[in-house]
Image (spheres, rainbow, N blue to C red):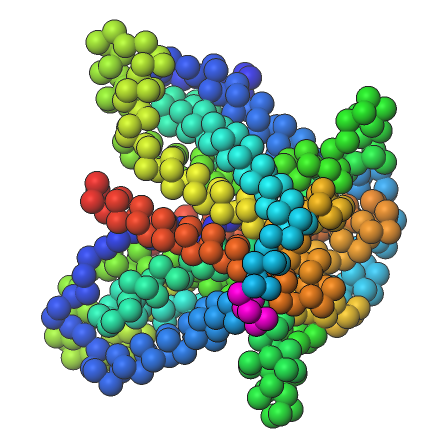
Amino acid sequence: MAFFQRKRRNILPGFGLSMGYTVFYLSAIVIVPLSMVFINTIPMGWEPFFSAVTTPRVLASYRVSFSTALFAAVFDAVAGLLTAWVLVRYRFPGKQFLDALVDLPFALPTAVAGICFATLYSPVGWLGKSLTSWGLTIINTPTGIIIALIFIGFPFVVRTIQPVLEELEPEIEEAAHCLGATRLQTFSKILLPHLFPALLTGATLAFARGIGEYGSVIFIAGNLPMKTEIAPLMIMSKLDQFDYNGASAVALVLLLISFSMLLLLNAVQEWQQKEYR
Amino acid sequence: MHPPKRTPGNPAPKTLSDPKPVQIVLIGLTFLFFTGFIFLPLSLVFSQAFQKGWEFYLECIREPYAVEAVKLTLLTVSVVVPLNAFFGLAAAWAITKFNFRGKAALKTLLDLPFAVSPVVAGLIFVLLVGSRTPFGSWLGEHGIKIIFSTPGIIIATLFVTFPFVARELIPLMEAQGRDEEEAALTLGAKGWQIFAKITLPNIKWGLLYGMILCSARSIGEFGAVSVVSGHIRGQTNTIPLHVEILYSEYNFTASFAVASLLVFLALITIVLKSAMEHQFKKTA
């Protein structure tokens, strides 16, 4: 416990108890279990590890997860900015209702979202029927995965932009207006740069969530090897074959990716605070 | 990771606004997006669930396996939420009421589970206490089974919902500071008195908010639970897993009927969440 040493003026009681319990519970539920991925992978040695995570099928699954999560995050950035703008700036009937429903993707179990989209876009589904007649297939394609991930990531972008947009001073827009800027110029030259860090944060959150997402994707993806198989599913199928080493090797790569996303996010947020405080 | 909390803010500036046609187009586009991604999926659930009539719907949700799944999910929530709420209180007390080195690092560690894919969250417990690991086989010899049984589901859910309460409480208690507690201390209050009479009333809404988010995620968790459950009907099937099994057996109506229960819960969560955000607005 030497690491968590007390310094200056701590007069309230209960430090030892609360800190002790925090460290114990954190270790038992998070740190020790997570370290199993490293403990299982390290004895493998570099060569077997490298070959386990670079088989063509595993590489393809990273590619699928990455590209679909990226597309979905970009779409979410646009749709989320639009929604946040409309919700903060305009008055219209049903606004509060929309605002509350932004959280639906967060509150709805992912498996339910998964079967909904798979049914909507199936060749006999409400949307799939007309899309199929136009020669478009969504189900069992990367597009289907992107649709599921757009749904999952949407609230992250809206809820990061909304507070920044609400706190924006009307004076800067008025100043731009007085200096002769059009609305569009004000938006692209004044507002967008100001909102950009929040937009980036929201999109990064959506992207990070998209890479790891499982429940909403597997139903619509069809899980075809090399085409629509996502990285979390690779872990699942390796586990089903009792290939624990292979599963933890793929998991280690995913973990390292998510941790670097977390670090990147912290850097973006620090930059945001420095830039606009 | 979960979306940051909505902060109710100022009304739109009156002086400058977009022209009416622009407003109409943008609002229309938003409604279009919501139709495709929110309204259609929601109405699909109910239209599919009631496809074969009210009678069949009731039959699907009263079927013994469905009832067992509901019971298991309720059991999981009733263990997970109090444990994580208690942890959230302890962590928030330690982090916000004291100064110590490594505070920032500790806060980052608390958020770790948000960055982990649900499937990885399940995997780590299979690696830790699965029957093929040393620790797991030792437990097995003593008649304790964790993976492919209820304790595994509970532990995996604990991991996934680990930060929810702490994450709500820490910023709240940071903003409130320590003055009130320190004043109580100088007036002779004991530790637990300070907590029960000063701190708890101050943070009750935040605590409840975190517990609601934690319950919603515990009910709906799919990936992590799916790894550790083993999908044994009537025994280790939670509601989302039951939905999946019915769906993969092409029993779509039953699957959507059970899913509609989860949709109701999600809608209740949203209503509670908005109601509490109004509460925050009032107290702020």
Could one spot residue A147 in this view of the protein?
no
Residue A146 placement (x, y as % from top left): 59, 70
Say left or right for A51 vs A33: right
Q: Which residue occupies the foreground of this view, B112 or A180?
A: B112
The magenta region covers B49-54
Q: Is residue A122 visible?
A: yes
Q: Residue furthest bottom?
A: A134
Q: How many marks?
A: 0
Q: Does A60 sit above or below residue B107?
A: below
Q: Quadrant of the N terminus of chain A?
A: top right
In percent of the image, x 29 and y 69: which residue is there? A94
Q: Decide: is B165 above or below A158.
A: above
Q: Quadrant of residue A100?
A: bottom left
Name the residue rendered at 59%, 46% in the picture.
B70
**Residue B265: x, y in percent?**
47, 52
Instruction: Say which quarter of the image contains residue A56.
Output: bottom right
Say left or right for B168 vs A62.
left
| Residue A139 magenta | no
Q: Position of residue A46 (x, y in %)?
A: 84, 46
Depth check: give the residue in front, B256 or A216: B256
Query: Residue A144 at x, y = what percent?
Result: 62, 73
- Left or right for B166, reference B183: right
The residue most toward the top is B188
Q: Is residue B23 left or right of residue A109?
A: left
